Image (spheres, rainbow, N blue to C red):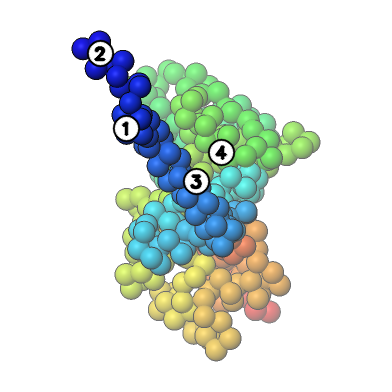
Amino acid sequence: MSIGYSGGFSTTAHTTVSEPQPSRPAKHGGRGNDHRGLLDRVLEFLHPGPDSTSELIETLAEAEERDLIAPESRQMLEGVLRMAELSAGDVMVAAPRMDLLDIQSTTDELLGAVIDTGHSRFPVYDGQRDNIIGILLAKDLLKLQRAPELNVRALLRPAVFVPESKGLNELLRDFRSNRNHLAIVIDEFGNTAGLITIEDVLEEIVGEIEDEFDVDVGDGDAGIYTLADGSYRVAGDADIDAVNDAFGLKLSDADFDTIGGMVAHEHGRVPRRGETVEIAGLRFAVMINRGGAVRWFKVTRTPASEADELSG
């Protein structure tokens, strides 16, 4: 055995055979790695990756067209990307449209407000609407049925306040970690600017979240729903014809295809969240803006007296 081992080093034939064995795989692997690296660099030069959110969104749209991702997945991914650029002030319900409860109200008055609006949480104020002292959960009012001696103040949960500039990503993280579903948005002067819920934030990702009170009054995908309080939720891209059918109107569709376009024209620009526009006896209040357009309106019929004043 020792002679054979030593002879392996002294024989030229053994040397030429044995030397490449350990080096060949490494050399081959090195060539392959270099080749793939060069190919990657060439592909990156010919098709560079997205450099902005808009380019990334376009890439997602292309992936959907190639059936690499489902339309629903693309919409959610788009929502995540757009949400990163939004703040609480962009999504909040403006202060004038907030449904508040007065701490001085009777139990019957509180229950009436809860039933009329259909919300599960309410900011409660004392004296002035700007003086919010807590949050009342609708289910907590049931405790008053068994224990009328309870003080409503004892049922209040602490109110969470956030600035208008707070990013939605950070706000969603806070909602999850604190197990809180509603926050009061304040402006730079400390005044109440509006409120925002976890549902408002999630809808920026998954789209409008329907509930059991949403009843479609249009034709399938017309985008017109009846709400619990008797008002309507109308999509900004709802066809003029669908709106005419739902409300018994005769709005012209000669210049506009969607109700959102008509409302923007009447207003002089795309209305912001919380702003209202009156058209043909209907009051269009903006619920959600998305992508520079109105996503949803809350529509109520203008009282006859107000309609007469507007027409006059």
Q: Which residue is mark 3?
A: 34
Q: Residue at x 39, y 71 (%)?
A: 222
- Within 10 Å of the Cα at label 3, are there few (<14), some (14-19), or many (20+) other Cα atoms? few
**Whole-number angstrom distance, CA of label 2 to CA of label 1:** 16 Å
Q: Nearer the viewer, mark 1 or mark 3?
A: 1
The disc, 4 or 1, on the residue closer to the chain's N-terminal end is 1
Q: Is residue 165 left or right of residue 22?
A: right
Task: Name the amino acid type tagged 4.
Answer: Asn
Residue drawn where x is 58% and y is 41% of the image? 168
Q: Position of residue 225 (x, y in %)?
A: 39, 62
| Tag 2 near tag 3, CB within 8 Å | no
Earlier along the polypeptide chain: callout 2 or callout 3? 2
Residue 70, placed above or below residue 260 = above
Q: CA distance from mark 4 to mark 1?
A: 69 Å
Q: CA distance from mark 1 to mark 3?
A: 32 Å
Residue 136 in the image: x percent, y percent?
Answer: 49, 30
Q: Which mark is residue 13?
A: 1
Q: Which mark is residue 169?
A: 4
Q: Is residue 32 above or below residue 161?
A: below
Marks 4/1 in contact by CB < 8 Å: the verdict is: no
Q: How packed is label 2: few (under 14 Cα within 10 Å), some, or many (20 or more)?
A: few
Q: SS at mark 4?
A: helix
> Can residue 103 be seen here?
no
Nearest to the observer: residue 91 or residue 217: 91
Label 4, label 2: how far apart the Cα atoms are:
74 Å
Name the residue rendered at 56%, 62% in the picture. Answer: 46
Q: Secondary structure at mark 1?
A: helix
The label shown at residue 3 is 2
Mark 3 or mark 4: name the one nearer the start of the chain. 3
In what quadrant of the picture does the C terminus appear? bottom right
The three-letter code of the residue at mark 3 reads: Asp
